[in-house]
Image (tube, rainbow, N blue to C red):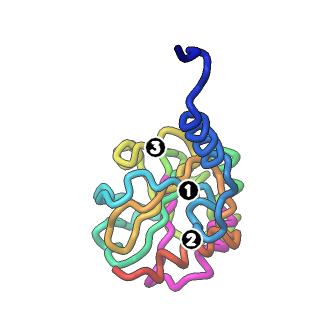
Amino acid sequence: MRDRRSVPAWAVLGWVVFLWSTTAPVSAADPFAALKVSRAGLGTAAPAFTLKTVEGREVSSKDLAGKTVLLNFWATWCGPCKDEMPALERLRRQFDPDAFVILAVTTDIQRGGIRTFVNQLGLGFPVLLDEDRDVSVAFTVRGLPTTILIGKDGKLVGRAAGPREWDSPQAVALIRSMVESAK
């Protein structure tokens, strides 16, 4: 009769493989993993939206077809959000605006404060007002900052909850891989 306390070798091996795979170092070859961007919703069409910029100009998702899009949900009261804005601007400057677009989406209602912040940092990307929070809800934004990556085909590619160094070599490699990918 077998001792019930003994564990079969295949079970031990399975646990070792599982534990190793969950603690293995991140591959530098995978820019998503290197930047800790999840592939949540991969292949799902991004929700359609139309919002106005702080200046009152309308921006629609349908006008972004064929471009890689980084949607950054943020607020002026969110310290980490404000801290990552200069890095987003530096990232924007590294790519052709006909191929890559950054849109900052905020639910803030203090337009004057938003304009002052944008002007102080010299941000060149649009800041969109989501006053009714419809777009934030559609993209399931639960915390700030949240960044959504959308491929040229209009489908969700990745999601990052929390701040990132958007001008880091890993971020540039990630965006470059998206911009250079076939449609």
Q: Residue at (58%, 48%) from the top-left corner?
A: 145
The spot of residue 150 in percent (x, y) is 41, 65
Which residue is drawn at the image coordinates 36% and 66% (left, top)?
A: 59
Q: Where is residue 3 in the image (x, y as percent from the top left)?
A: 58, 15
Q: What element carries label 1?
A: loop
Q: Residue 37 appears in which quarter of the rendering?
A: bottom right
> Which residue corresponds to the image point at 34% horizontal and 64% vertical from the top-left?
155
Residue on which disc 1 sits:
37
**Residue underneath mark 2:** 174
Tell me whether circle 2 and circle 1 mark residues in contact (CB < 8 Å).
yes
Query: For residue 118, which quarter of the picture?
Result: bottom right
Please name the residue that numbered disc 3 is placed on: 141
Marked residue nearer the N-terminal end (1 or 3)? 1
Give the percent coordinates (x, y) of residue 142. 49, 38
Report the front residue among 77 and 152: 152
Amino acid type for the residue under numbered disc 1: Val
What segment carries the magenta color?
Answer: 84-105
62 drawn magenta: no
